[in-house]
Amino acid sequence: QITEMQQSGRAAMRVLSERLRMAGFSLPATVNALEGADSDPDTIRVWHIEADGCEATTTAGMAATGDALVCTGWDIDCFTTDKPAYVFDANAGVGEFFTVTGKQASPEAFTHNGLSRTYPLGSRVSFIREVSFFLDRSDTLHPSLMKQEFDETPEIYADNIEDFQIRYIMSDGDTLDTPTIPTLVSRVLVNLTSRTDRRDNKSEQDYLRRDISFQVSVRNNE
């Protein structure tokens, strides 16, 4: 049980560190790298583009907000129908998420669920990863660290994680429970508590526990 407790804690630390280091990677200026809530246990949501990228550039402007986003010559296979993508007009500094409703092969283009404005030639279309982490205590005997991508069904990432607390070190040195200005987050402090699967009748404690604390620099946050 102690070995399983340690493995669960290390697994949670590994995935959180990986995602927090990626926070903000290659994002358009209008998308925040992260978002947190001081909800005891806390929650955190991270956005980034994968290191190998999944992007295209429009090769024609839109005449109407319902027009397809045409990206002739770009490989758009990495985009998935019914999943979100993001379109960004760098000249206007404006962008928005949309759902890919279909893909055309010739010319390469995206159909979508509607945009708030038309986007010109040269707009950037990206698949942006959104991952949330939070604690699920609904099963009081087996609280779990949950991982959720977009609005998909959450999945258990680490079993028997009893507590999950996050604080944010800002660029001016202040430490906050909630990042009021996400772009100014410099480092993220994480504290989680893993515990054994069953109570230990030979111990004065009901469970054996291990606290794990670590911090991650948000290197891609600008």
Image (spheres, rainbow, N blue to C red):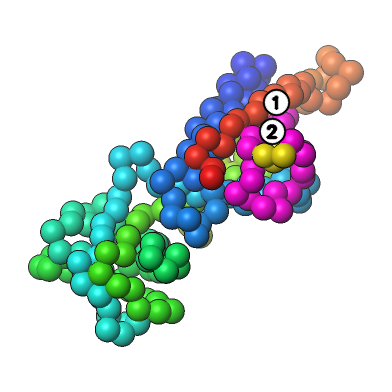
In the image, farthest residue toward the left: 106
Magenta region includes residue 41: no
Towards the viewer: 19 or 171 = 171
Residue 114's x, y, as percent? 38, 79
Lateral position of residue 67 relative to residue 193, left or right: left
Q: Residue 94 location, x and y as percent? A: 45, 68
- In x, y percent, where is residue 210? 73, 22
Q: Is residue 169 visible?
A: yes
Q: Is residue 49 left or right of residue 106?
A: right
Specify the quadrant of the image occupied by residue 169.
top right
- Judge by depth and name the residue closer to the eye, 66 or 26: 26
- Which range of residues does the magenta coloring cover? 173-193
Distance of label 2 from label 1 (alpha carbons):
7 Å
Please give the residue where the numbered disc 1 appears in the rendered image. Answer: 213
The residue identified by callout 2 is: 189
Q: Residue sitting at 10 percent across and 68 percent down? A: 106
- Contact (Cβ within 8 Å) of mark 2 with mark 1: yes
Residue drawn 44% across and 43% down? 25
Depicted 215 relative to depicted 97: above or below: above
Q: Quadrant of the N terminus?
A: top right
User: Where does the C terminus fall, quadrant-wise?
Assistant: top right
